[in-house]
Amino acid sequence: MTYSILESGNLVASFDEADAGQAALERLAAASPEARESLLLVAIDADGAIVSDCAPGERVVPA
């Protein structure tokens, strides 16, 4: 599973662990409140399919 942060659809960063992605999402949202609405963390499976997503303040929960 890969956890990727997107901002307005553009890849910002990618992580192998959900906790690392979640922490980075929260740091980005805190550092740039105006970008908060355009940030999204997505969980991507080995086939490249998005299996879960979350916005800042939420937790990503893969199915």
Image (cartoon, rainbow, N blue to C red):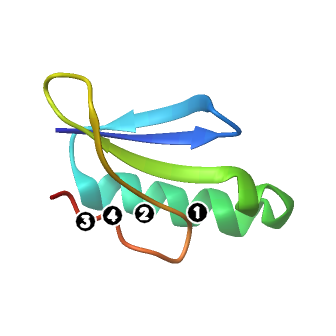
Q: Nearer the viewer, mark 2 or mark 3?
A: 3
- Tag 4: amino acid: Val
Query: In this view, which residue lies farthest toward the right?
Result: 34
In the image, residue 45 lies at what x, y percent?
18, 34
Q: Nearer the viewer, mark 4 or mark 1?
A: 4
Q: Rate crowding at label 3 as few (under 14), some (14 to 19) or many (20 or more) other CA atoms within 10 Å.
A: few
- Tag 1: amino acid: Arg
Tell me which label, 2 or 3, sits earlier in the chain. 2
Which quarter of the picture shows residue 22?
bottom left
> Helix or strand or loop: what does disc 4 sit on?
loop
> Helix or strand or loop: what does disc 2 sit on?
helix
* Residue 62 vs residue 20, the one in the foreground: 62
Q: Rate crowding at label 1 as few (under 14), some (14 to 19) or many (20 or more) other CA atoms within 10 Å.
A: few
Above-or-below relation of 28 to 56: above
- Residue on which disc 4 sits: 60
Q: Which of marks 4 and 2 is in front?
A: 4
C-alpha distance separating marks 4 and 1: 15 Å
* Residue 46 vs residue 17, the one in the foreground: 46
- Residue on which disc 1 sits: 27
Tell me which label, 1 or 3, sits earlier in the chain. 1
Tell me which label, 4 or 1, sits earlier in the chain. 1
> Helix or strand or loop: what does disc 1 sit on?
helix
- Residue on which disc 3 sits: 61
At 25% from the left and 23% from the top, the residue drawn is 48
- Tag 3: amino acid: Val
Q: Left or right of 54: which side holds 59?
A: left
- Residue on which disc 2 sits: 23
Q: Quadrant where the C terminus lies?
A: bottom left
Tell me which label, 4 or 2, sits earlier in the chain. 2
